[in-house]
Image (tube, rainbow, N blue to C red):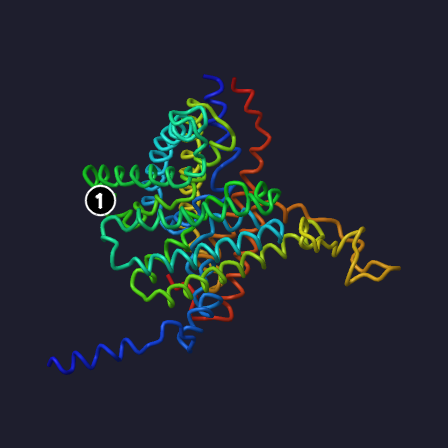
Amino acid sequence: MADTNVKAAPVQEKEPLFQFGKKERKLLSDPLNDNNPITVQVLGICSALAVTSLVYPSVVMSIAVIFVCGFSSLFTSLLRNYIPKQVRMIVQLVIIASLVTVVELTLKYLNYPIYKQLSVYIGLIITNCIVMGRLEAFAMANKPWRSFLDGIGNGLGYGAILIIVGIVREIFGKGSLFAGSPIEMKLIGPTAEYFINTETSTLFGWYANNNLMVLPAAAMFIIGIMIWIQRSFNKKLVDIS
Amino acid sequence: MGEFFNIFIKAAFVENLVLAYFLGMCSYLAVSKTVKTAFGLGLAVIFVLGITMPINWLIHEYLLSETGVFGLDLTFLRLILFIAVIASMVQLVEMVVEKFSPALYNALGIFLPLITVNCAILGGSLFMVSREYNFSESIAFGLGGGFGWFLAIIAIAAIREKIRYSNVPPALRGLGMAFILTGLMGIAFMSLLGIDPAAFQ
C-alpha cells in the first residue's frame, strides 16, 4: 500500500510546471467559439456593449479584461488551498479589485483621453461576470498555469466579440476605423481616404453615416445576429427550451 | 424635493441603467424567463441600490476624499471599499429574504448572491461619484435607477413569456431573441429622452 503511494506521488510531480500540449491549446481556443463567454455563456455583456461604438476603446477594454482575467485566475489558483470556502467571494473580489485598480491607474497615466472615454466601465471590470465566473468555475479547482491559460482564453473570446462589434459599429456609424488612435482612417463616406478609394474617385462616397449604429441599441442587434449566425453553423448550441 | 423627484425620473426613465447604459445585463438576461422571478430580483435590486448608494456616498465623502477624516486623497481605494459595502449588503438582503420568503429565496437561487456582481449596483455608485451628486440626490439616484432596472426586467420577462408561442427561427430562440428584443426596447425608451425633467419641479 505504502509502496503504491510513494510511486503515485512522483508521477504527479513529473508534470512540468509550464507545458503547452493539446489540452492547454484547447483551453485557449475553446472560448473563441464553442464556449464563448459572450455568445454562449452570456457573461460579461454589461461592460461589453457600452464601449463598442468605436474600435480603439474596444481594443483597450479587451486588453484590460485579458490582463485582469488571466492574472486573477493565476492568483486565485495559487491561493486556492488557503481560501476558506465561506469568504471566497470576498477574497476573489479583493483580488479582482486590486488588479482593476492597477489597470485603472496605469491607463490614467498612459492615455488620459481613453481613460476619460471609458469612464466607469474600467471600474466595472470588477463586476464583469466573466472574471468572477472563471474564478468560480475553473481557477478554484485547477493548477495555476492551466488557470492562467483559461483566464487568457476567456479574455480573448470576450475581446474577439468586442472588436467585431466595434468594427461593424464604427464603419457603419462613423465611416471611420480606429478613430482616436495613431492609425485613424476614414473608410467610407464623402471624406473617405485609404484602401478602397483611389485619389480620383471614392468608391463609397455616397454613404451617409447611419446614426442608429452609434446608439447602444445597435450593439444588441449585432450581438443578436452574431448569435444567430454562430448557432446556425454550430447546431449543438441551439436553445431547445 | 423637486430636485429629488427630478433625479428619480431621470434615472428611472431617461437614463435607464439597463436600456441606456447596459448595466446589469447578465442577471437581466438570465433571470428574465418568467415574470415571477424577474419581479423578485427587481425588488432586490431596488433595495440594494437604494441602500448602497447613500452608504457609498458617505464613504466617499467622509473617508476617501481630501476633506474627509484622514485628510488624504484615498480615492484609489474606492473600488475595493465600494465592492465590500455592496457584498455585505447583498449578504444582508439574502438573509432577510431567506427568513421571510423561502419560496422567493429558492426561486432566485444563485442570482441573489450574484447581485454582488451585478454591474448596475457598482456602476450606479461610480456614476454617483463621477456626476458629483449630494447625499439626497444619491438616494434619489439609487431608488430611481433600481426602479428603472425593475421596470426593464419585468417588461422583457413578459415579452419572453409570450414569445415562446411564436415561430422564431431555431438558431435565434432564447438568447438571440432576447438580445434583439432588448435592442428594440432600448430604442423605444429613447423616445422618453424628450421629457424635460424640469417640468416636474
Q: Secondary structure at mark 1?
A: helix
Q: Report whether B110 appears left or right of A38.
A: left
Residue A207 is situated, as x and y percent measured from the top left of the image, at: 76, 53
Q: Report whether A43 appears left or right of B84.
A: right
Q: Looking at the image, is A4 positioned above or below residue A231? A: below
Label 1, on which residue? B103
Farthest right residue?
A200
Q: Looking at the image, is A37 positioned above or below residue B51? A: below
Rendered image quadrant of residue A194: bottom right
Residue B121 is situated, as x and y percent measured from the top left of the image, at: 40, 39
Query: Quadrant location of the N terminus of chain B?
Result: top left
Look at 34% across and 31% down and name the residue there. B51
Specify few, some or many for label 1: CA neighbours under 10 Å numbering under 14, 14-19, or 20 or more: few
User: What is the total number of numbered labels drawn onto the structure image?
Assistant: 1
Amino acid on which disc 1 is placed: Ala
Residue B145 is situated, as x and y percent measured from the top left of the image, at: 44, 34
Rendered image quadrant of residue B79: top left
Look at 67% across and 51% down and name the residue there. A181
> As rendered, which of B13 and A193 lies closer to the eye?
A193
